[in-house]
Image: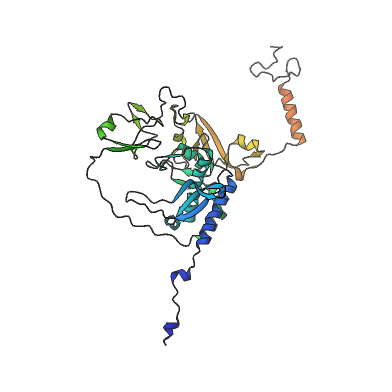
Amino acid sequence: MSTAAHTPDLTRTCQNPVSTAALVAALEAAWSAIRDQHSEVPAAVLVVGSGSPTKPNQGMKWGHFAALRWQAGETQLPEILISGEGLSREPEAVFTTLLHEATHALADVRGIQDTSRQGRWHNKKFATLAAELGLSTTKDDKLGYSPCTLTDLTRARYKATITGLTEALRFYRHPEPTGEGKTRTNNNNGVSCECECPRKLRISTTAFEEGPIVCAVCSAAFLPEDIDRDTYEHPTFATGSTPAGDDDQDQDDADDSEDPMVFYDPTGERYGLPTYPFKFAPDGLLTRRQLRTRNLRPGGQDPAAQIMWRRGKRVAYLFRLDLAMPKRTATAAQRAAIDKALTARRTCPDCGQVKPYYIPRRTGTCLDCD
């Protein structure tokens, strides 16, 4: 018998053993780490499944959130799907997907509608929640504020968690073939539109160009998927306007002559410093006043970002919380010097009396002597 007959066949699987249990455990540990930082994010069932598109014109799905899909005794739990195809990416990208889905979970808990168009369009409310969880979002023409990246603070905060994912991501799923599909040569089927509900209808191109049709349920216009709803304009319709007699229209879409997202510049490419609209600052960045309420000070660090609002006339610098230092405590001699200086400001140079108010600088004397 030849020696080759006794040689074991060392396949790739044997040389690099994989563990589905270890992979799911690492994903669950990452979800727990997110919940440790943000207690409102609910517990969920994490599954790994297919993210391949079913049609040639669809994109790959990296993750998905579905509310109340699992039953555990008396409790209903949401589902977080992580696509097997997405496991071929870097561990940081996989963790970004988990934080993205955690944003949807947080919106579901708070009763906030953060998406439309069957979950494809991510609105400004999603961007606000994503910033709260430590993500920077950019606006895509078809997906809204769906594209996300980790901020430097978030990357440092979850460094150990991302390392744990690195050790578990040893295999991934191949995409399923979908075929090349057919290319349309004409547009005789009109325009397919949908509102925020979403309900769909199809109208001719000529009819759509005359003016959009407004849904009586959600008061939103029926628009094609490739049109940005936030910037769409038509002489007969204002996207952010409130219909007559509808006092309950969402104030988030009201036309207040200023779109706060013009100040959304997380990379600092436009304003020279990472810039966010009012109330959009990521977690871990605080203003001087917010630091003072925690008995902290910047500690000599340069501003890490800034907030802009009121057409850019108001600016507040943001500082990293992890680099802040405790406020200094004044010594007895310093407090005495401060009291002496304040007393001098209340002493009239003409009559020498100490007044219960500061001597006006414009007169240089007390009110009685003036």
Q: Position of residue 357 (x, y in %)?
A: 70, 19
Give the quadrant of the C terminus.
top right
Q: Position of residue 111 (x, y in %)?
A: 51, 37
325 sits left or right of 86 in the view: right
Give the quadrant of the N terminus.
bottom left
Out of 71 and 256, give the one closest to the viewer.
71
The number of discs equals 0
* Residue sitting at x 32%, y 55%: 178
Q: Position of residue 9 (x, y in %)?
A: 44, 76
Q: Work out which residue is located at the far bottom of the displayed protein and give it.
A: 1
Q: Work out which residue is located at the far front of the displayed protein and give it.
A: 73
Q: How is the image coloured?
A: rainbow
The picture quadrant where one finds residue 39 is top right
Out of 235 and 367, give the one closest to the viewer.
235
Q: Can residue 167 be spotted in the picture? A: no
* Residue sitting at x 46%, y 39%: 114
Q: Can residue 58 be spotted in the picture? A: yes
* Residue sitting at x 49%, y 60%: 169
From this view, report whether residue 197 is shown above or below residue 21. Answer: above
Q: Position of residue 60 (x, y in %)?
A: 39, 51
